[in-house]
Image (spheres, rainbow, N blue to C red):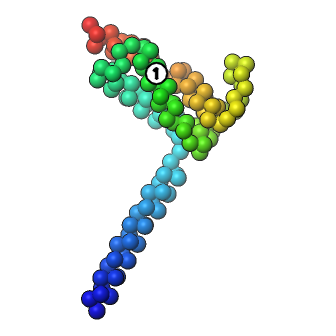
């Protein structure tokens, strides 16, 4: 009788654990790329790195921007989401042919970031902190 109760408890725990894992996967699958959220998070990361002294020039924050865009474009599924969100369909850039969805997503996200971010705020923050 005691063993039966123990097994029921054990299987119930496993069932709950699996249910939580499935819900986490469903949440992850339902997440899609949001261009506004990306810019907001990128701004926060760059400002934080400037305030921490890790970005000391415009070259540093452009490098950080490239690193964050690289991270966003690692997986094919994410790249498709990025291209869909940014309406990126042109596989040519600067007379060069883009050969993968990763490249298209990277270039589209870079162009979007450059156009949407106010890099002057970073220069101003750098000047204020270096004064």
In the figure, residue 120 lies in which quadrant? top left
Q: Give the x, y percent position of residue 63.
A: 46, 21
Which residue was labeled with disc 1? Answer: 63
Asked if residue 5 lies left or right of residue 34, the reply is left
Residue 20 versus residue 89 in the image, above or below: below
In terms of depth relative to the viewer, which is nearer, 64 or 125? Answer: 64
Image quarter where the N terminus lies is bottom left
In terms of depth relative to the viewer, which is nearer, 90 or 55? Answer: 55
Q: Residue at x 34, y 77 (%)?
A: 10
Q: Residue at x 30, y 82 (%)?
A: 6
Asked if residue 11 lies left or right of residue 62, the reply is left
Q: Give the x, y percent position of residue 13.
A: 35, 72
Q: Crowdedness of circle 1 by 10 Å Cα count: few (<14), some, many (20+)?
A: few
Q: Give the x, y percent position of residue 23.
A: 45, 60
Q: Residue at x 55, y 36 (%)?
A: 73
In terms of depth relative to the viewer, which is nearer, 89 or 95? Answer: 95
Q: Residue at x 35, y 15 (%)?
A: 56
Residue 18 versus residue 49 in the image, above or below: below
Residue 125 versus residue 10 in the image, above or below: above
Residue 79 versus residue 120 in the image, above or below: below
Residue 69, can we see it?
A: yes
Asked if residue 84 lies left or right of residue 62, the reply is right
């Amino acid at each position: 009788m005691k063993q039966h109760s123990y097994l029921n408890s054990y299987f119930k725990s496993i069932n709950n654990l699996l249910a939580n894992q499935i819900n986490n996967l469903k949440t992850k699958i339902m997440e899609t790329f949001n261009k506004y959220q990306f810019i907001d998070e990128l701004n926060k990361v760059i400002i934080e790195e400037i305030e921490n002294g890790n970005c000391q020039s415009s070259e540093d924050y452009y490098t950080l921007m490239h690193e964050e865009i690289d991270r966003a474009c690692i997986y094919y599924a994410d790249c498709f989401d990025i291209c869909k969100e940014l309406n990126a369909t042109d596989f040519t850039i600067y007379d060069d042919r883009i050969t993968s969805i990763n490249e298209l997503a990277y270039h589209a996200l870079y162009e979007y970031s450059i156009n949407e971010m106010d890099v002057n705020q970073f220069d101003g923050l750098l000047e204020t902190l270096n004064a």
